[in-house]
Image (spheres, grey):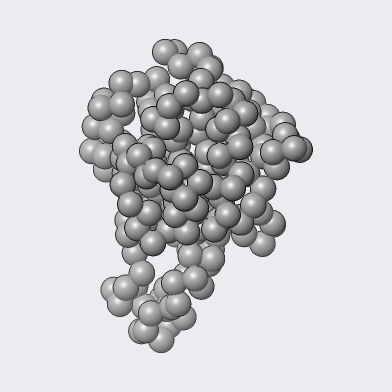
Amino acid sequence: MKLIIGLGNPGREYKKTRHNMGRRLAEFLVEKEGRKFRRLKSLEAHVAEMSWENAPSVVVAYVETYMNLSGKRIRPLFDHYEVSDLQDLLIVVDDIALPFGKMRLRAGGSAGGHNGLASIEEAFQSAEYPRLRLGIGIQHEEHPERSAGTGTYEPMRDYVLSEFSSAEEKDMTAFLERGAESCQRWASGPFEKAVQWVNSAKS
């Protein structure tokens, strides 16, 4: 069994924000495969079963909790499906350090200041789980329009909770398509080949 979880925040107001990119990809992937989520009420999670070549048993999910509490819902979901190894858990997450459209697949690593990853690390007492990082745009002075036109930095929280620009939304489908392919390649393995494909892809 393999488990793919997209991180995000519940609520309509967060649906298209940068911080919701992980959940957005999970929803896109399920729709692309012609599947539907079902709600596991006791676990406060939405899940959909997948089956790909070399990966006959995969669950794509998102949980009903705010980003900084992600681990409290993901750990019970991991146990519910009796996933045997942390390397069979893929966390799909937004990354402010990557330009929009770039992706990185890693076998583990630090939370890098991301509250969702920090919560998962606390829940599992480990940072050694794969994560697919999705670039949501780098916030710096080269992009003053991301700072309300003032030429100064937006507070980080305001930036990640902002929506994508119209230009970014125009390229969103292609980004999500590559993200969905990345998830499938991770699930089907081998991991090293998936890493090579994801990390060498041009945005």
The residue depicted at 36 percent of the width and 84 percent of the height is 151
Snapshot quadrant of residue 143 = bottom left
Residue 138 place in picture, x, y as percent: 34, 64
Snapshot quadrant of residue 198 = top left
User: With 59 as the anchor, is 186 left or right in this view?
Assistant: left
Instruction: Point out the residue furthest to the front here.
Output: 125
Instruction: Point out the residue furthest to the bottom here.
Output: 150
Instruction: Point out the residue furthest to the right here.
Output: 41
**Residue nearer the viewer, 194 or 169:** 194
The residue depicted at 59 percent of the width and 47 percent of the height is 72
User: With 64 as the anchor, is 114 left or right in this view?
Assistant: left
User: With 20 as the anchor, is 34 left or right in this view?
Assistant: right
**Residue nearer the viewer, 63 or 147:** 63
Q: How many numbered dots are placed on residues in this image?
A: 0
The residue depicted at 26 percent of the width and 25 percent of the height is 193
Residue 192 place in picture, x, y as percent: 25, 27
Placement of 161 over or under 2, stated as above or below: below
Residue 178 in sight: no
Residue 85 in sight: yes
The residue depicted at 50 percent of the width and 33 percent of the height is 4
Residue 203 place in picture, x, y as percent: 31, 46
